């Protein structure tokens, strides 16, 4: 079911055993501030877990406009992530991505020791002026490419569109395209500003920091499906390469933080939120467990009579 509203309604009528994610417009009415189901949904079981997943907007760092990191930093500082979580997502997130790409739920990773970007519209305007666009004057209209069919993605996109206009006087047009075309355009370097999310393939920071590894960018200018922002910094690559061959876990985590800090200092992405996965299950479903990578282990799940 592509429509998450329909999924939830079908679940509530007893036609489904599980409903993954909750439509944002319903969330505040059926989940309280203690993350407990309320009203008619209190008869169901609600599972939630901070996910190894981050939502972000990518900047094509070789684009004539976004190759200026002052512009990328200005965009980052013009976005109030906490307001998005409170008023758009109604709390349905693990937290704002104010430190880095690696989520706060990554085991053994001191996520909050990485310095990212917080809401600072005054500094954002200063940086944009330094880049040659005081009060946004002369700044070209920017197209934000989104994949079609995602209600949450559109709501966040419209909110960030408004924040960039309000704080930087920058006009952003939203362009929705089908997912396959969306990925093809991003991988081919044809989308200067685009929406993506990344979910861990395994519980190690490498699976996220690969997205900044310069040696994954083809010298020929071909497709770049992992490092789609085409970020290249020798200092990052050196720290990252050292980390992935270090067997001592604590030292490897430290080296990953060094590498991630190098990437964050150059702002190749506009990081938005770290996800929290919510799902309802029927009360007769037993031993169903969430996990941070949404890898479902169903062999032990059973139905009570």
Image (cartoon, helix red, strand yellow):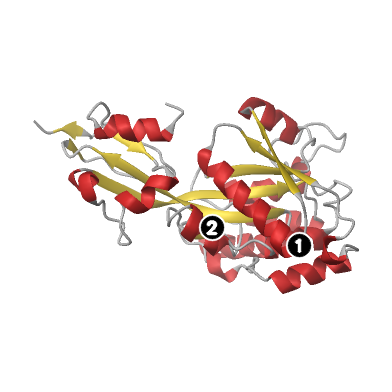
- Tell whether 278 sits left or right of 301: right
Q: Residue furthest left?
A: 305
Identify residue for label 2: 84
Residue 199 picture location, percent across and down = 53, 43
From the viewer's side, name the closer residue of 75 and 186. Answer: 75
- Tell whether 101 sits left or right of 287: right
Label 2: how many residues lie within 10 Å, few (<14), some (14-19) or many (20+)?
many
Residue 236 picture location, percent across and down = 74, 57
Label 1: how many residues lie within 10 Å, few (<14), some (14-19) or many (20+)?
many
- Tell whether 287 sits left or right of 211: left
Quadrant that contains the C terminus = top left
Quadrant that contains the N terminus = top left
Is residue 245 visible in the rendered structure shown here?
A: no
Please give the label number shown on residue 168: 1
Label 1: state its secondary structure. Answer: helix
Residue 292 picture location, percent across and down = 42, 48
Image quadrant of residue 23?
A: top left
Q: Earlier in the sequence, mark 1 or mark 2?
A: 2
Image quadrant of residue 258?
A: bottom right
């Amino acid at each position: 079911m592509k429509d998450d509203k329909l999924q939830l309604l079908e679940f509530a009528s007893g036609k489904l055993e599980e409903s993954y994610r909750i439509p944002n417009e319903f969330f505040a009415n059926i989940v309280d501030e203690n993350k407990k189901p309320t009203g008619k949904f209190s008869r169901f079981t609600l599972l939630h877990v901070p996910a190894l997943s981050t939502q972000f907007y990518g900047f094509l760092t070789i684009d004539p406009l976004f190759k200026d990191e002052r512009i990328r930093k200005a965009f980052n500082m013009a976005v109030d992530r906490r307001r998005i979580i409170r008023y758009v997502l109604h709390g349905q997130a693990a937290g704002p991505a104010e430190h880095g790409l690696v989520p706060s739920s990554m085991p053994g990773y001191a996520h909050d020791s990485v310095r990212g970007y917080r809401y600072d519209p005054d500094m954002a305007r200063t940086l944009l002026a330094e880049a040659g666009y005081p009060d946004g004057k002369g700044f070209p209209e920017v197209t934000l490419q989104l994949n079609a069919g995602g209600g949450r993605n559109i709501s966040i996109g419209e909110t960030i569109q408004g924040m960039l206009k309000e704080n930087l006087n920058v006009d952003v047009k939203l362009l929705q395209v089908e997912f396959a075309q969306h990925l093809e355009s991003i991988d081919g370097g044809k989308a200067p500003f685009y929406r993506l999310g990344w979910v861990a393939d395994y519980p190690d920071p490498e699976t996220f920091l690969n997205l900044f590894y310069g040696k994954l960018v083809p010298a020929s200018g071909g497709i770049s499906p992992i490092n789609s922002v085409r970020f290249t910094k020798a200092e990052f690559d050196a720290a990252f390469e050292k980390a992935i061959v270090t067997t001592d876990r604590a030292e490897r985590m430290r080296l990953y933080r060094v590498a991630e800090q190098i990437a964050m200092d150059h702002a190749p992405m506009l990081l938005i939120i770290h996800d929290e996965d919510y799902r309802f299950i029927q009360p007769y479903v037993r031993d169903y467990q969430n996990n941070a990578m949404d890898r479902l282990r169903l062999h032990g799940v059973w139905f009570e009579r």
